[in-house]
Structures are given as structure tokens and as C-alpha cells.
């Protein structure tokens, strides 16, 4: 069988006649009669119509095969061209992905440099983080096991604990110790390896914001652990309550984007605000991420808890995390004030309200710590505020005065917060637990006085500059 390379070239047909191959050549202009004569001549066959029909059938069959092969060739060629195009496009995608990665790295480095090279809280992520890190961890957790000294164990129970001296692995070991020490591992029948995996999953899902990062998570959890000991809550609350308090503290700011105030989320119509209908969008998101992590079998520290009991634990943790929304501060504190004078530890509503106030105290407790530990946190928080207010200005959104870098100073940021938020709340808790006055309330009063002194110095400097400028202006006239 043969074929031509073009429709204008002569056509060649090879026929097998009695074992002898015959070649038939004819042009595209040949008439049917010419073809018939050619076939008769080349094959030396009688000029019989039946015979001719038989030969024509053979020719038709060979033509059909030839055309099918040509069609197949065309199809294969087209498919190869498509595959080559796809390979080319995929190659371009790889290049683009690498370019995006490099751009992101440059942006993160730039944000870190803007943070002044701070080791403790580098700005590593932008608002839309590159995907959640909720990946299963079936391996044995790799962070080293630290043996805590007796000095460290005692220090963990106090607000004077210096959180800036500890690496992430060490903080993970401290958190692990707290769960064992409080009897939570035994109470909930936790697999110790699962506890390690869960803590690693928690740490990996805190972003590297200036303030709302894993170190802040550890601070809140450590002060909660300290208050449990200081207020002797082991004798007043159940182990389940203690587990709820500690777990809510650990999870309370998971995957925080670094944009703090609820009103920003609402005004900017962020994805979180839309998803949660403007109702505590950040806090709802922290809850969701917390239970996404717990939904992983290898991270579920409550795997051995009965379903009905877990349902109640889950609801209690959600209640506490949602209570950290400062938009609800007045409502929650007023509710506690109405209960504190006749507080009943057997009353579930009273205990729930107490737990809400305790996590609120722990969440904003930095000023309870010594000045050298507390003051760096003010710098971190203001940095985060300024990043947010700069973005609000660029987007034409309302800017809160206490976040505006052009209006706020460290003393003005802290004085009002300590006087009107921290001291009233801690003094209310002090009515139930008088032992916190010396260790927690008095440091708040000292901190207030410290910042008021700083403000007086700032005001004096400002007045002096104003006077000097007026004097210079008078001389020029």
C-alpha cells in the first residue's frame, strides 16, 4: 500500500496479484476509464466487470487504510502540539511561582527590617497569609525535651516570669509541663505524644506579628497558670474547668492577622467580617482554627473524652475565646460585678462568668509584669497599631486616635488603658481573690504612675520646644 505526499502528486497503488507485486501509477486527472485500463494492463487480467469490481474493492480498502493513517497522523501531531504547549505553559507557571516566592521573601525581609530587626517578634507574614498550616503530624514531635529546673518551675507560677528569655522550643516544653502539672493529661487521658503534636500545631498556626504571636500566646497561658496557683483555683474549680481555661488561653489568638480592632475588620469588609457577619470576626476565627487543629486525630488532646463531655468542653472554650473581644469588655465586667459580692462556686453561671473575666485578665496582663518585661510589649503593640492605622489611612478608613502614629505616644497609649480598663477589672477580681493585690494590682498602679511621670516629662519637653520656637519667631520679626 502506498500514498502520495500531496494531492497534486501522482498516486501509486501496489497490488498483489498471484504473489506478484504490481505497481499502478496514475495522476489526479485520470478518468475512471483510464484507471480501469491501467489496472487491466498492469495486472494482465481479463477485462471482466466482476474482476474489475473485485480489484476496485481492494483499491478502495487500501485507500481507506491510507486515509485513516493520515487522519491518525494528523491527530497525533495535533496532540503533540497541545502537549508541547502545556509543557511550555507549566514551565512558565513554575517560573511565575518562583518569582512570587522571591517577591514574598523580599516583602517579609522588608517588613522585618521595618520592625527594627527585633529578634523576638519579626514581621514575617502579610495580612493574607500563604495558607493554613493545618498539616497532620504523625511523626514524633521533634522539639527537644527540656528538664525544667526547680527555679523555673517556681518562676512559671508568678507574673514576674521573664518571657523574653525563652525560645519557642523552651516555651513549648513549659506549656507541656503545665498540662502535666495541673493533672490535665491524666484527667483527659491525653496521649503525651498527642499533646506534643497539638502544641506544635498551635505554635505553627500563630503568625509572626509584632504583638499577636506565639510568645503572646505563651504569656497569656503562663499568667493563666500563675493565676490558677495564686488564686488556689484547683480547690475551687473542677479539673475540666482548669483544662478549659488553659486550652482557651493557648488558642485564644490563633492565626491572628495582625489587624486588631473589630471595627477595622468591619470597616474594611474583610473576609473574616463577611464570614462572621461582623460579630467578633477575629475571635470567631481563632475558635475555628483551634477546632480545626483539634479535628486532626494526631492533634486531638480530647480524643479520649466522651462525646457529650467534649461537646460541653468545646462550647466552654468557644465562650472564653469570644469573651476576649474588647468590644464586649463593659458587658462582661458589669455582669461579673453583679455576681462578685455574692459569688457562688457551685453556680454554673457564676463560674462561667468568672472564667470569662480570668481569660480577659490574662489576655491584657502585660502591665502586671515588671517594667523591663512589660515595656517591650508596648513597643510591639504600638508597632502593630501603626501598621494597621497606616493601612486604614491608605484605604480611606476611619483611624482610631490611639493607633495613629502622628497622635499617640507610649505614655498616652498606656495611661488611659491602665486607669480605665486594667485597674478596675483587676480590682473587681481582687474582691474575690484578695491575694492578687500585692502581686498583680499594685504593679498596675505602679505602672500607671510610671507612665504618668513619663507623660509629664514629654509635656515639659513639648512646652519647652514650643517656647523656643516662639522665641525664634519673635526674633525673626
Image: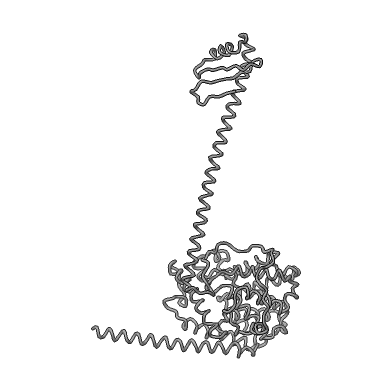
Q: Is residue 66 above or below residue 355?
A: above
Q: How many marks?
A: 0
Quadrant location of the N terminus in the rendered image: top right
What color scheme is it? Answer: one colour
Residue occupying image coordinates x 53% and y 64%: 128
Q: Is residue 99 left or right of residue 143?
A: left
Please determine whether, in this image, residue 75 is positioned above or below residue 371: above
Image coordinates for residue 364, horizontal then vertical, percent: 57, 80
Judge whether residue 320 can be spotted in this image.
no
Residue 263 visible from this viewpoint:
yes
Q: Is residue 118 above or below residue 99?
A: below
Task: Identify the residue at horizontal 59%, vertical 29% (top origin).
Answer: 69
Task: Note whether 314 is above or below 157 in the view shown.
Answer: above
Q: Nearer the viewer, residue 424 or 436?
A: 436
Q: Percent from the top left, x then y, of residue 104?
A: 50, 62
Asked whether, in this view, residue 445 is left or right of residue 184, the answer is left
Q: Quadrant of residue 332?
A: bottom right
**Which of the image's four quarters has the C terminus?**
bottom left
Picture quadrant of residue 469: bottom left
Q: Position of residue 307 (x, y in %)?
A: 74, 68
Q: Residue at x 45, y 77 (%)?
A: 401
Residue reaching furthest to the left: 477
Q: Please give left or right for residue 377 compared with residue 390 in the image.
A: right
The x, y position of residue 315, in whole percent, is: 68, 71
Q: Nearer the viewer, residue 40 or 190?
A: 40
Amino acid at each position: 500500500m502506498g500514498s502520495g505526499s500531496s494531492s497534486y502528486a501522482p498516486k501509486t497503488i501496489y497490488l498483489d496479484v498471484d504473489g506478484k507485486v504490481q505497481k499502478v501509477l496514475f495522476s489526479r486527472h485520470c478518468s475512471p476509464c483510464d484507471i480501469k485500463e491501467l489496472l487491466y494492463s498492469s495486472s494482465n487480467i481479463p477485462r471482466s466487470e466482476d474482476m474489475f469490481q473485485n480489484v476496485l474493492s481492494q483499491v478502495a480498502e487500501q485507500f481507506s487504510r491510507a486515509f485513516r493513517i493520515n487522519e491518525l497522523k494528523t491527530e497525533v501531531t495535533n496532540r503533540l502540539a497541545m502537549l508541547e504547549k502545556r509543557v511550555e505553559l507549566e514551565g512558565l507557571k513554575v517560573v511565575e511561582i518562583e518569582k512570587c516566592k522571591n517577591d514574598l521573601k523580599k516583602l517579609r525581609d522588608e517588613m522585618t527590617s521595618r520592625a527594627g530587626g527585633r529578634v523576638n517578634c519579626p514581621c514575617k507574614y502579610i495580612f493574607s497569609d500563604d495558607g493554613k498550616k493545618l498539616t497532620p503530624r504523625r511523626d514524633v514531635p521533634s522539639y527537644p525535651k527540656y528538664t525544667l529546673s526547680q527555679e523555673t518551675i517556681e518562676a512559671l507560677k508568678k507574673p514576674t516570669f521573664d518571657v523574653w528569655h525563652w525560645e519557642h522550643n523552651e516555651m513549648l516544653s513549659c506549656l507541656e509541663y503545665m498540662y502535666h502539672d495541673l493533672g490535665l493529661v491524666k484527667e483527659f487521658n491525653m496521649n503525651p505524644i498527642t499533646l506534643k503534636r497539638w502544641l506544635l500545631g498551635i505554635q505553627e498556626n500563630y503568625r509572626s506579628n509584632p504583638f499577636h504571636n506565639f510568645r503572646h500566646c505563651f504569656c497569656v497561658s503562663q499568667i493563666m497558670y500563675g493565676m490558677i496557683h495564686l488564686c488556689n483555683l484547683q480547690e475551687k474549680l473542677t479539673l475540666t474547668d482548669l483544662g478549659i481555661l488553659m486550652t482557651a488561653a493557648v488558642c485564644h489568638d490563633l492565626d491572628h492577622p495582625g489587624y486588631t480592632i473589630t471595627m477595622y475588620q468591619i470597616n474594611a469588609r474583610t473576609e473574616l467580617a463577611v464570614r462572621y457577619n461582623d460579630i467578633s470576626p477575629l475571635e470567631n476565627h481563632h475558635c475555628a482554627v483551634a477546632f480545626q487543629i483539634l479535628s486532626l486525630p494526631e492533634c486531638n488532646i480530647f480524643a479520649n473524652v466522651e462525646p457529650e463531655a467534649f461537646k460541653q468542653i468545646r462550647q466552654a472554650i468557644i465562650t472564653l475565646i469570644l469573651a476576649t473581644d474588647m468590644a464586649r469588655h463593659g458587658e462582661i465586667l458589669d455582669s461579673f460585678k453583679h455576681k462578685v459580692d455574692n459569688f457562688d462556686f457551685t453556680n454554673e453561671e457564676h463560674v462561667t462568668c468568672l472564667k470569662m473575666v480570668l481569660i480577659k485578665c490574662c489576655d491584657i496582663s502585660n502591665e502586671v509584669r515588671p517594667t523591663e518585661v512589660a515595656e517591650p510589649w508596648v513597643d510591639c503593640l504600638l508597632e502593630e497599631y501603626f501598621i494597621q492605622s497606616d493601612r486604614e489611612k491608605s484605604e480611606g478608613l476611619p483611624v482610631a486616635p490611639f493607633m495613629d502614629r502622628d497622635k499617640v505616644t507610649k505614655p498616652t497609649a498606656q495611661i488611659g488603658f491602665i486607669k480605665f480598663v486594667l485597674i478596675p477589672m483587676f480590682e473587681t477580681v481582687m474582691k474575690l481573690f484578695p491575694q492578687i493585690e500585692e502581686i498583680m494590682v499594685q504593679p498596675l498602679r505602679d505602672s500607671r504612675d510610671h507612665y504618668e511621670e513619663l507623660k509629664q516629662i514629654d509635656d515639659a519637653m513639648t512646652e519647652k520646644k514650643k517656647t523656643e520656637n516662639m522665641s525664634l519667631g519673635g526674633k525673626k520679626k
